[in-house]
Image (cartoon, rainbow, N blue to C red):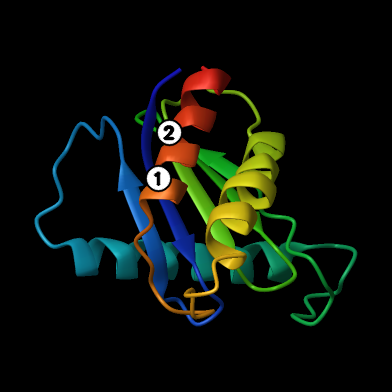
Amino acid sequence: MTYYAFYIFNRQGVCLHYQEWSRPRTVRNEMDDRKMMFGLLFSLKAFVNKLDPTSGGSEMSGQCSFQSFRTNKYKLHYLENPSGISLVLMTDPLTGDLREFLRHVYSTCFTECVVKNPFYQPGQPFTSDQFASALNKAVRTHL
């Protein structure tokens, strides 16, 4: 199992945090990469909601049922919390379901190291060595 990259977005599409491990292709423009990732997620969520036979295409029907998708090159894992924080993890395409892992990252790494930090401003990008270290540890122990 190979982890490529990890993103955290707020509800407005601002990338709060980005971390990369072994992404095979380097990104020329980080800002464009983050905008394209959020645009992809926004479009996929809308598409999934429109096709959802239980909600009738209503966008106000609650939690999005989009969790992951796979290509021949990578798999994208997605978790959106009720607070509007979205966690995105890109891995190799053979990786299984990582929803529980993303929940663990949110509840332990993000909540403990970022949200409980008195200097953190909600909805603003952050850099935190403590969070990066906790995330790296979670990734290493999950391998």
| Residue matched to label 2 | 136
* On screen, residue 113 above or below 108: below
| Residue matched to label 1 | 132
Q: Is residue 59 left or right of residue 10?
A: right
Circle 1 Cα neighbour tier, 10 Å, few/some/many (<14 / 14–19 / ≥20) = some
* Callout 2 amino acid: Asn
Q: Is residue 22 left or right of residue 107?
A: left
User: Circles 2 and 1: CB distance less than 8 Å?
Assistant: yes
The residue closer to the viewer here, 116 or 83, is 116
* On screen, residue 83 above or below 107: below
Secondary element at tag 1: helix
Residue at the image point whose x is 20% and y is 31% from the top = 24
> What percent of the width, then of the height, locates residue 30?
19, 61
Whole-number angstrom distance, CA of label 2 to CA of label 1:
6 Å
* Callout 1 amino acid: Ala
Q: Is residue 125 left or right of residue 119?
A: left
Q: Which mark is residue 9?
A: none
Secondary element at tag 2: helix
Residue at the image point whose x is 48% and y is 29% from the top = 137
The residue closer to the viewer here, 118 or 79, is 118
* On screen, residue 128 above or below 82: above
The residue closer to the viewer here, 2 or 40, is 2
> What percent of the width, then of the height, locates residue 141?
54, 20
Residue lying furthest left in this view?
A: 28
Quarter of the image where one finds residue 33 = bottom left
* On screen, residue 4 above or below 117: above
Circle 2 Cα neighbour tier, 10 Å, few/some/many (<14 / 14–19 / ≥20) = some
> What percent of the width, then of the height, locates residue 62?
83, 72
The residue closer to the viewer here, 113 or 84, is 113
Residue at the image point whose x is 41% and y is 26% from the top = 92
- Do we see residue 75 in this rendering? no
- Do we see residue 130 in this rendering? yes
